[in-house]
Amino acid sequence: MGDQQRRKRETADLARALRGAVRGEVDFGAAARALHTMDASNYRRVPVGVVAPRDADDVAAALAVCREHGVPVVPRGAGTSIAGQATGTGVVLDLTRHMRDVVAVDPEARTAVVQPGVVLDRLREAVRPHGLTFGADPSTHSRCTLGGMIGNNACGAHSVAWGTTADNVHTLEVTTYGGAELRLGRGWEGGPEGLADLVGRHLAQLRTGFPPGLPRRISGYALDALLPERGTDLARAFCGGEGTLGVLTEATVRLVGAPPARALAVLGYADESAAAEAAPGLLPLGPLTVEGMAEDLVRDPAARAALPRGGAWLFAETGGATPAEARARAEALLRAADALDGTVVTDPAARRALWRVREDAAGTATRTGAGAEAWPGWEDCAVPPARLGAYLRDFRALLAQAGLHGTPYGHFGDGCVHVRIDFDLVTDEGVRRFRRFSEDVAGLVVAHGGSLSGEHGDGQARAELLPRMYGDELVALFGRFKDLWDPAGGMNPGMLARPARLDENLRFAVLPRERVDVTFGYPHDGGDFATAVRRCVGVAKCRVDGPNQSPGVMCPSFRATGEEEHSTRGRARLLHEMLAGEVVTGGWRSAEVRDALDLCLSCKGCRADCPVGVDMATYKAEFLHHHYAGRLRPAAHYAMGRLPRWLRLAAPFARLLNAAARPRPLAALAKRAAGVAPERDLPALAPETFTRWFARRGGRGSGTGDPILWPDTFTEHLTPSVGRAAVTVLEAAGLPPALPPGRVCCGLTYVSTGQLDHARTVMRRTLDTLGPVLGTPVVVLEPSCAATLTTDLPELLPGDPRARRLADSVRTLAQALQEYAPDWRPPRLDRPVAGQTHCHQHAVLGDTAERRLRERAGLRGELSGGCCGLAGDFGFTRGHYDVSVACAEDQLLPAVRAAAPGTELLADGFSCRTQLAHLAGVRARHLAEVLAEALEAGPATRATPRPEGRPEGRPEG
């Protein structure tokens, strides 16, 4: 029997044994393995399978089977580690699926008992009513798990006040690869045999081998926590073990009092070194945080405008029993700081906006200011805080000497710096240069008395260099420490003790060197699909845990399912593995990628909300184009993907077809043939199209200087009331609209179903039609159509200058009014609003003009974020109904249910209005309809709110 056949048989035997022993899920399929090949690092290792244990008994059973088969194990949380330690070649234990409970909270003792898969924000929510919080808070707090934080000894922004994770751990329940179930706390009880003797024989080495004055020393094993003068804390020594010692099954953690009020002092300095040198001077005043970043990380002009004068900033947060006390402490920091400029921010929304700039830095920094790719690898070293300014100057000089670029930022109060660097990790010479720089900067950190890792652990990125920091003897002691816990070497081999080389297992090595033939232009990625896919670095902002935890849209399908393969990151991983061809085979024909993309709503939320701008809607359209090339497509692609054609043909027979669709048997037959979900009502066709109404009314067609009102398919055939209302509003504002000189279509439905050849044909025909009026402002009422014209059109026709010209002409109604009729005053309505900002509006167009128009009209309140879940054809397609409803229940439906009587329900998107009609029995309206109604009613009745959303079985039309 050949080696390959023997390995297949052994893997099958292992999977069979695990399924017989474990109650949780066991998945050795290509998709599961592909989803776990990478974390948020530069590294890739392919596991043999994935197990999601239900409890500690399952963990023990899985370890027993793996031990019997001689297969290593890697415990994994959210997979946000940036040094490679959450990847492995054996069995991955996914602790996030089931072991995610806050077991108990003791407010008096200020402790909580948690399972390893609980997300940090869930713990913080559970203890917030008691005025408590967990001290360590990495920027990934909305998705990182307590188990992962313990494994990496995570820190976060508030460590100057509350320390690292290890500082906040009381006891740990651990199961070793050998099957021992241990309870670790203070004292030697629970530790492996021989540990006390090992420490006792090396006391002098342990007392002198660790650099002093480092609040952020995360590198290596924390053997000094076992010194008698340190209290012999086994739990603390286990923290930062990176899954190499055992599997955590439960933890009792310490909690700290959360200040009832907070304020933020934002201090501007000439450069980052000046900010770094000022940071230690603030610590005696007791700030909760002292964070630093430089101007090359702040690329959003609006965010930059909100910051004080300077080239770098410190964010120093203070707490207090009252807002006044918190503000007074922040003002004291402002007075004590030797800053160029500064301000104190107390408004919670403004503070959140500023913190978001800092928290998104892990993603923002993955592109340099010039747009080049930047990677971890030297991500989070730490030096004594008093040395940080000098270190940063030397580090910048070393970057320049190597011809590299990076943007340092991080926890200046603790001397810890994050940075992503534009390494070339694709070519052989680039990888050699990566190694040389890593060795040089390791020497620089050690020269400044620092730690190679100050937060995220060593993993594969830095463990090889630990002898430079600790010397060979202490590193050898690390190996003996590891062996006492794990003599068989089954726990996460290749990390910390006897590590793999830092330039092995790089995730880029498996990608094709030749460009993949694609249809979209990918202008932000040099036209290269592989570059676009590797935008995803794994920070997992798309994996926000639970509903209502994100202010944006991304990622509605993950929020609905909780499954990694239905997150933006998961899909990017599968596309990466599809290009690699090792785990996911079949290329564009891959069933694994198709199935993962099936629940992508093409909401484009990731395009805006992902810190690195992954655009999964485009990748999905590209994949579907290739996947179904020359093959039969799903029925929904022919029915809904070519909707403009069918509606145009059906328009003369609208009344007849509406009548025919009323009998349930006929409607059911039509839905079955079209691939429509049986739970959905078919939308009624308008008896008179919008363009026919416009012509009958005496519309002029195209006129020089008139704005063009775009008759999108939905307005034209399903809700012409929106178009009629827009005409009323534009005319009232002195902007009488014209229609295009012929038939036009943005191609949206063809793009979303991956029929890209059809889409380009439609788009070219549209450009031909618009030839005489190109450059005229084009007012588009349907946000999804406006987004398609703005982004997909120029990206599908990159060689046609007319595409960019049309894209630049597109305006929403509110944008057109703001730009071309700035002095027009809308009718005053004075009523509250609820509803939803369309996901494409949020992601592509922005809603600043809409917010301003609503404010001027007296429409008070915020619209919900998220995605309605209908998303064009998605929610109508058979098999998607449950996920569609779950997406609506995330934000939209709760917001509408909570609305007070008389609230105006707004939704500019046809999908959003249809979803509300179907699921809530209420009628939402386009902003144009609300304004037009008030204009037509006259001043006497404008402020009278209409009755709360009227129940309606289907949208108007």
Image (cartoon, grey):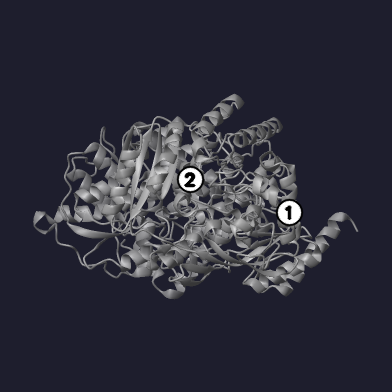
Left or right of residue 172, residue 288 in this image:
left
* 833 left or right of 22 in image: left
Q: Height in image: 307 above or below 456?
A: above
The label shown at residue 493 is 1
Q: Amino acid at mark 2?
A: Pro
Label 1: element kind = loop
Which one is nearer the viewer's eye here, 467 or 572?
467
Q: Position of residue 181 (x, y in %)?
A: 69, 70
Foreground of the two, 502 or 180: 180
Residue bearing mark 2: 611
Task: Name the spot of residue 520 as percent of width and height, x first.
Answer: 54, 40
Residue 68, percent from left and from top: 80, 67
Question: Disc 2 to disc 1, how far (Cα)?
Answer: 31 Å
Q: Nearer the viewer, residue 945 or 360?
A: 360
**How many residues crowd around disc 2 within 10 Å: few (fewer than 14), some, or many (20 or more)?**
many
> Residue 627 vs residue 687: left or right?
right
Residue 190, compared with residue 476, is above or below; it is below
Residue at point 64%, 71% (across, down): 56
Q: Is residue 565 visible?
A: no
Amino acid at circle 1: Pro
Give the total of numbered labels. 2
For label 1, count other residues whose C-alpha is less than 10 Å away and answer few (under 14), some (14-19) or many (20+). many
Q: Quadrant of the N terminus?
A: bottom right
